[in-house]
Amino acid sequence: MAMENKKEQILQAYQFRHACKEFDPTKKISDEDFHFILETGRLSPSSFGLEPWKFVVIQNPEVREKISSAAWGQKQVTTSSHFVVILARTKADLTYDSEYLSTLFNDVKKLPEAAKEGLTKAIKRFQEVDFNLESDRAIFDWACRQTYIALGNMMTAAAQIGIDSCPMEGFNKEQVEQILKEEGIMQGDFGVSCLVAFGYRVNDPASPKTRQTMDMVVDWVK
């Protein structure tokens, strides 16, 4: 029974979550709750465990206004309780022989030399043969796909504790990156993957959630 209740609670969170377009600027997420949301992002899986992301929480109103101007003027940027720019690493950091990966394997994962060599070879084959990730853009897009795993986990975790969210791709990437660089926020080999706002809704959605049926989106091969 406990497991059934847990599954029902998770599904209820998915029903609750929607792309919130209007946040109540007077309601703020507690530090404890937002740390919980960030932790689910930090602990998310990534290809080869490379963690090619950085989560930049922007609370400065002036910086938010600038980003909003490059994000179609969307109010979520300025009215949400917490606003996050998710960065993805670029080719300089993610090629199999990069300094970043060497530091990650040695200092964070503390891999034995044999394990490090084996993983490096696997990544090299994956990038050069299996997925043909040779161009700067191909590597960056691969990194962005990993950030979306973290993004989904963060939004689901937020929904499970009654916090709204809105993922955002409606922005000019070049302009947002320029703003972050001018403000000294984005340094190193990163690019903007996506934006996401967190807070509390003003109104419930006007209509219930609709999705294609299970048989429309799932094929079984037995």
Image (tube, grey):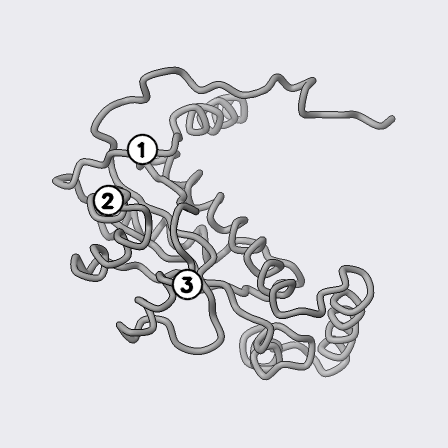
Bin the neighbour count of mark 2 within 10 Å (Cα to Cα): few under 14, some 14-19, many 20 and up.
Answer: many
Residue 13, given in percent of the width and then of the height, sits at 42, 29
Rounded to the nearest angstrom, the CA distance separating label 1 from label 2 is 14 Å
Identified at 44% across, 61% down, the residue is 192
Position of residue 59 in the picture relative to residue 208 (left or right): left
161 or 183, nearer to the observer: 183
Rounded to the nearest angstrom, the CA distance separating label 2 from label 3 is 23 Å
Position of residue 88 in the picture relative to residue 92 (left or right): left
Snapshot quadrant of residue 136: bottom right
Q: Dot 3 corresponds to which residue?
A: 174
For numbered disc 2, what is the local secondary structure?
loop
Q: Nearer the viewer, mark 2 or mark 3?
A: 3
Identified at 22% across, 61% down, the residue is 63
The residue under label 3 is which amino acid type?
Glu
Q: Dot 2 corresponds to which residue?
A: 80
Disc on the earlier residue, 2 or 3:
2
Residue 151 vs 106, above or below: the answer is above
Label 1 close to label 2 by CB (< 8 Å) = no
Residue at the extreme left of the image, as rendered: 26
Residue 156, given in percent of the width and then of the height, sits at 44, 38
Rounded to the nearest angstrom, the CA distance separating label 3 from label 1 is 33 Å
Bin the neighbour count of mark 1 within 10 Å (Cα to Cα): few under 14, some 14-19, many 20 and up.
Answer: some
